[in-house]
Image (tube, coloured by chain):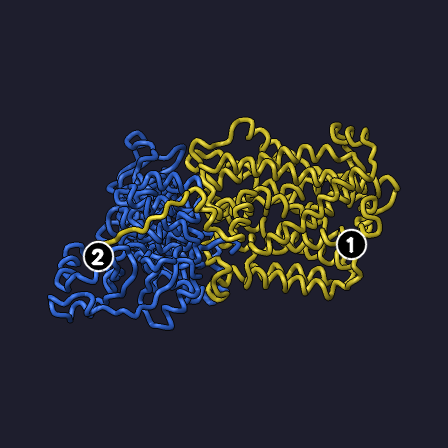
Chain colours: A yellow, B blue
Amino acid sequence: MNTTKPPERSMAAARTVVARMSGWQRLMLFLAVMGPGLITSVVDNDATGIAGYAIAGTRFGYSLLWVLILTTLALAVIQEMGARLGSITGKGLADLIRERFGVRITALAMLVLLIANSTTVVAEFAGVAGASEIFGVSRYITVPIAGLVVFTVVVYGSYRRVEVVLLAGSLVFLTYIVTGFLARPEWGAVARGSLVPTFDFTLPYFTILIGLIGTTITPWMLFYLQSTVVDKGLGEREYALERLDVYSGSVILNVVAFFIVVTTAATLFAHGEPADTVTDVARSLRPLAGDFAERLFAIGLLNASLMAAAVLPLSTAYAVCEAFGWERSVDRPAREAPAFFGLFAGLILIGLATVLIPGVPLLVLLFLPNVVGGILLPVVLILMLKLVNDRRIVGQWVNSRRQNAVALGATIAVSALTVAYLAIAILSVTNL
Amino acid sequence: MPFVSQVLGRAVLDPDGSRVGTLRDLLVAVELPYPPVRAVVIGNSHLQVVPWAEIASVTPRATALRHPFDRAAYPPASDDDLIWIGRDILDKQIVDTEGVKLVRVNDVALTLINDELRLAGVDNSTAGLLRRLRLEWVAGLFGGARPRLIDWGQVDIGPAVDVVRLKVPFDGLRRMRPADMATVISQMSPGKAADVLEALDDETAARAMAELPDEHQAAVLTAMEPDEAADVLEQMRPDDAADVLGDVEEKRAEELMRLMVPKAAREVRSLLAYPEDTAGGRMDTSIITVSENDTADEIINLLRRTAPSEDQIYYLYVVDDAGHLRGILPLRNLIVAPPDARVADIMHRDVEFVRVDDPEEQVAQKLIRYDLLAIPVVDEQNRLKGVVTVNDVVDLVTPRSWQNRPRRMLG
């Protein structure tokens, strides 16, 4: 008679943990290692990003490349701040803003986020419309379908599973790196454009300049990145890896951006061709894939748009509900989380409806959030800087002097550009 | 009944009516029921703490002092003062122990009892939010949304306040059932959840951990201090512990198993050898085995001595010297049998069982088809390895919406 005799098995336990995983779990492990920083960067190269970089290259050739060098640095430092806030506090950005600054500042920050993200969601559906028109399909068919797909996948399916497909699809944009070489750019001009800042005090120049920054460093990405870090339970221990993850994400994002600018500069700008429609921009891929170029571009654009169209409404609804203490979860029935579902569905509907207005210029919709985001970004950056320098919140993990210099520099630069931009805009309007 | 948002930021007046500063915060002794305000923070050029005895009244119009304000008499406010309502509780997340969820504190209701200003409850309603924003008129448009008050007796401010600042952290959470505790903990970030589990005693923490959703378990365990985590794992049933460790990163899992007492670690390790979605991965190894030659009396004495858990006691398993499964002995048969009856004569020989590598769905189906509370698991040689209870597979047979799910952005 004996109790509780544990069965013995002499199997190397080192293998056991992985042995217990299904193929799916192994893939998830890989994605977990891939990390929030990289995923955020991939989502950030959305429809607005592609439009922003392509227009910059088409209108101003290589002369704005220096901006990308600076935004890479700023993005890396700012994203690292977000990742650090998330890992150390275990709280989302909206949560921290509410706890540290109270209701009124939170309301302001959420208003900023809602405005910036609404315009971005509109742009993602404009991306869907643009892609479908390259294929010769009416946007009145594809855009409603896209909205339905996004809604269904997020609410009834598992976004995480779809994410893998979309992430794989975004590899299409790596083709821009190859195209960049095939387009035979003047490398001397590329180097000069990258290293020598030039200024041109005209409205188009400032619009594009702000847009270029605004599409790279966005208010939503700061909320999204931090929430993802918290969601994955990455804490102080994983912080070193997480920092590597956000740094590499920032660099990869900007390498792709760099080559989109180089490609469009070497093709459309060099030949003096305009980029008035999405199809014009798609043509810039010709050196790589000939006539197939447009379709390749369309697939990438569709993919990027769908991914961001799913992530943006969701992360917006999540942040707002987090800030105001409303029930938030896609796992609960809509009636238990009315604000969450209302915001989520509302943003998708706004996106759909705007794009379906007859005669609305897609490229403008695609570019608008870059400028709006650029203008509103300083609000979020200032709040983040205050949080990440508060010892009551992050303890010893406050910003170093160098990190503060870069982040503050970026904030001041973006603010100054915004003021200059608005001044020039008012001047040029009154001159008319 | 005023709200904290209605009194903070208002003028503090001397007895002669002259303004000496602004009311910045209220300091409370949270260890008492309906915590009384012990002091207030007055701000002019800097923050000073003035004891409650000096305060004549606190109203939404102004706070009045009993004696002329003597600036030199009061100490500057410091971090180690009592809990500040405005700084430490307002806008933070706390636990509603009756509602079993984490709620955001939009406002705090005050009440005056026998000259003492006390905290009455927490307002987490949208009406409270609008009051804070001075936008009450918006609520009026919708027919005057009423504030929803959570009685102070049913809140736990543990998640909002640094653990070291509380005499008894997570006092309210401790009194909840483990399943409810887990529901609340699953709404917290992994780091905060780890704080909670570390503050609880190991046994309670183990029960809460076992009830957490799979996705959350690994993250919380990773966020805990390794030796605390190992202590909690030891208190868990080996199959539950193996489930959790199976989801944790490999190096970390190894580290935790090294910190556990060797016996417990060995059991967990043996379970980890089976794939998670099979009978072996789901089974519990803590079972009671008896031999065919034991008598009813001997076994009842054994049970008295070892006091096994209720999960184990309903079925006893009869094995031979080599561990082969011979039959099962239901508790009922044991009790109604005469004291000297031999197990061989009162056991069931015709036993439903599953193999260690049977898929978990098949195990669940058998349990349901034959209406069993538990089913033994054997290896290829018919040796008893463990048992799967209905509780172990309940997640396979209940709708997903009944289960605790963490609030994540992307499900």
Q: Are marks 2 and 1 on the same chain?
A: no
Position in image of residue A18 (x %, y %): 47, 47
- Please state the chain letter of the residue tagged with numbered disc 2 in the rendered image: B
Report helix, strand or loop for mark 2: loop
C-alpha gap between disc 2 and disc 1:
68 Å
Nearer the observer, A427 or A198: A198
Nearer the observer, B325 or A338: B325
For the N terminus of chain A, give its image quadrant: bottom left
Tell me where residue A360 sits by quadrant. bottom right
Tell me where residue A423 sits by quadrant. top right
Position in image of residue B1 (x %, y %): 33, 57
Position in image of residue A287 (x %, y %): 83, 44
Tell me where residue A342 sits by quadrant. bottom right
Name which residue lies at 75% across and 56% down.
Answer: A131
- Please state the chain letter of the residue tagged with numbered disc 1 in the rendered image: A
Name which residue lies at 31% across and 35% down.
Answer: B80
Position in image of residue B199 (x %, y %): 30, 44
Whether residue A24 sits left or right of residue B29 in the image: it is: right
Numbered label tally: 2
Residue A157 seen from this side: yes
Nearer the observer, B221 or B20: B221
Nearer the observer, A265 or A377: A265
Label of residue A295 in the image: 1
Name which residue lies at 34% across and 62% down.
Answer: B391
Report helix, strand or loop for mark 1: helix
Q: Are marks 2 and 1 in contact (CB under 8 Å)?
A: no
Residue B91 seen from this side: no
Sort mark 2 into few (<14), some (14-19) or many (20+) by Cα contacts within 10 Å. some
Sort mark 1 into few (<14), some (14-19) or many (20+) by Cα contacts within 10 Å. some
Q: Say which amino acid is labelled 1.
A: Arg
Whether residue B292 sits left or right of residue B373 in the image: it is: left
